Amino acid sequence: MTGGTPALGRFVLRVFLLLPLCFAAWYFTAPYHSAVAAGFARFFVALFNAGLISATEQQAIDIVFVTRVQVQQAPGQLGVLAIEVNPLIYSYGLALFLALMLAARARWWKILAGVAILFPFQGWGIGFDFLAQVGAKMGPAIAAQAGLLGAREAIALAYQVGNLLFPSLVPVALFVAFSRPYIESLVPARISAAGPRPESG
């Protein structure tokens, strides 16, 4: 057993104890950090169509993007398309990052810097969720009106990345980047106590 094993066990225990608290804090502050991520989402949407979104609203936790796309609500009545996105799908890594950093007793500025770096990745997920709904799930007529018909494959790929990879991998990667010396202290290199091998022959 290496000398780092007890320290590693204590770190893992702290992470598990902190996770419920961090997830509770993440959930109850969701309207605030989701609003920040929604701002980044609009930036990614603007890369495909700068005038597509006319307003952003918040209903409890969900982000509602009001578009300029017209849809028929009833015979002779037109309305605008509004798309809802649940930002929690893309921001749960925030709680994971906080638990890891607090368990490692990281400095406060590293925690704040990591949280700030996470926002654009959350915005990516939210923005491409919106674009996937408008550009693919609503049908080609809506996609054409939104100016997204030729970008559907790129949007689908970016949506998968934002949905499957970014939420879990980016928080862990940031933790490793900010806490490398601490991580190395948990798992020190095993030093062999054996002497040099005798020369053959």
Image: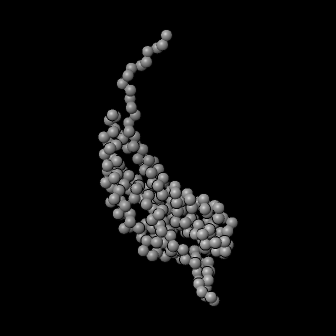
Q: Give the residue displayed 55% in from the left and 57% down from the top.
A: 161
The percent position of residue 163, horizontal first and vertical second, equals 52, 60
Q: Can residue 27 be seen in this view?
A: yes
Q: Is residue 108 visible?
A: no
The percent position of residue 175, horizontal first and vertical second, equals 43, 50
Q: Give the residue displayed 45% in from the left and 65% down from the top.
A: 88
Q: Which colour assignment does the render follow?
A: one colour
Q: Residue furthest bottom?
A: 76
The residue lying toward the viewer, choosing from 150 and 182, is 150
The percent position of residue 197, horizontal first and vertical second, equals 43, 18
Q: Give the residue displayed 61% in from the left and 85% down from the top.
A: 78
From this view, report whether residue 186 is shown above or below residue 195.
below
Q: Which residue lies furthest to the top in this view?
A: 201
- Residue 55 location, quadrant: bottom right
- Residue 10 location, quadrant: top left
Figure quadrant of the N terminus: top left
The percent position of residue 112, horizontal first and vertical second, equals 40, 58
- Residue 153 location, quadrant: bottom right
Count of numbered labels shown in the rendering: 0
The residue lying toward the viewer, choosing from 116 and 2, is 2
Q: Give the residue displayed 31% in from the left and 49% down from the top.
A: 13
